[in-house]
Amino acid sequence: MTSGLGDAILAYADSVYAVPGYPVTTLIEETGAELVINEKVALEYALGDSLSGKRSCVIVKHVGMNVLADTLVHATVQGLTAGVIIVVGDDPTAYGTQTIQDSRIYGSIAICPVIDGSDSDPVGEAFRVSERFSRVSIVRFIPDDLNRPWDKMVYVSGRKTGSLADPDLTMYGRSVWAYESVPVMQQEGYLPFPVSPLTTGGIPQSRRERGSSRMFCPDCPFKFVFDLLQDRNVPVISDTGCSLLSMIPPFAFGIANYGMGSSIGVAAQSTRVALTGDYALLHSGVQALIDLHAKGRPVLCIVLQNRCMGTTGRQPVPDITDYIGFAQPDVVDAAEHEKISEYIVPDNTFRVLVIQGVCPEERSK
């Protein structure tokens, strides 16, 4: 017999991902959720499903919110398509965990709706407001909520479509767009804690208004890769770093970005092609690579290896090939255009392509 919360998740969600621990383990077993290597990857999978039009639920315990926080915050300014919710179990008496944490605070950190798990239809409401405000919703419950009697509910889908941020918006403009919903969310009680307003005066909110965007350094060894993906109309999920150029005109093959190290997990459930850098992969992308490899899931992961943090000052990065041998990557030089053309053909397999190049000393302004 499932709990009311478990029944609601099964009724509303097309996919469910989870990381076990008290007090969510029972709920995970009730819903048959797919276990994932960590909470950040679970949310990446859910966002990939969202881009594919599927409603998705992530189940975590309270400390798991700390692991997925970066992707959660980025999701608010990037937007989504189908609803994504996080069902988080708090343990306010530390009965089965080592720490106490009120997960509702993440509503104010990520500017996303928080719904109380004791409400009459928290899962349905969470999906509806996720699509209404184009961001992840949080359903927060405590152990007693799983044991309380639930009235028999009539599940009504009420599906809508969220939206991604306008590609012309600057990073600051995306934040302004995301904050436009704050007054309504506060009025309707979705933000339990105060949110400070943005000061918007004098800061360009669109690339058109600003009149410029960052582009390739002179003689960038990786420009061929971008031209090839654009010419072949291969949609990719971009990572933070130089791969973001895939979303800036004249390029338009980058679909979305959900923060550092996020592209592989999101791509696995959407475009099946991820574009990332070697630092982003080591920073927090390798966990998704491990999970996908273990499960035999198809994805083409294109890694631009320049052995430095190219957008933050060229700080050195360890050689990733020392750490991803399990993925049996194909390694090519950025100048081997013919080989790269042969490798960049999306299919239904798990493949990692490492393209090695050296960034020029002089950066464009």
Image (spheres, helix red, strand yellow):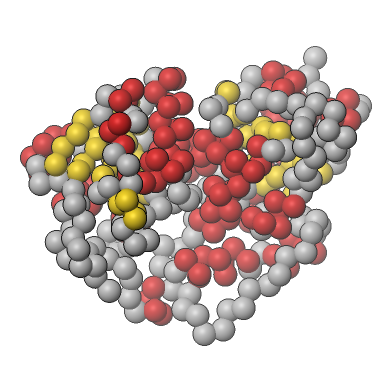
**What residue sits 75% from the left and 45% below the top?**
103
**What residue sits 70% from the left and 45% below the top?**
138
Foreground of the two, 241 or 213? 241
Q: Residue 244 location in percent, x, y?
A: 35, 56
**What residue sits 56% from the left and 49% below the top?**
70
Position of residue 150 in the picture relative to residue 156 (left or right): right
Q: Outermost residue, bottom direction? A: 202
Foreground of the two, 149 or 227? 227
**Vertical arrangement, residue 167 with respect to residue 134, above or below:** below
Q: Residue 126 location in percent, x, y?
A: 71, 44
**What residue sits 58% from the left and 23% below the top?**
35
Query: Does residue 88 show up?
Result: no
- Locate residue 195: give its quadrant: bottom right
Is the C terminus in the top left, top right, bottom left or bottom right quadrant? bottom left
**Vertical arrangement, residue 3 with respect to residue 318, above or below:** above
Q: Outermost residue, right direction? A: 149
Query: Does residue 218 show up?
Result: yes
Q: Residue 325 location in percent, x, y?
A: 30, 25
Position of residue 42 in the picture relative to residue 102 (left or right): left
Q: Residue 30 location in percent, x, y?
A: 72, 19
Position of residue 278 in the picture relative to residue 292 (left or right): left
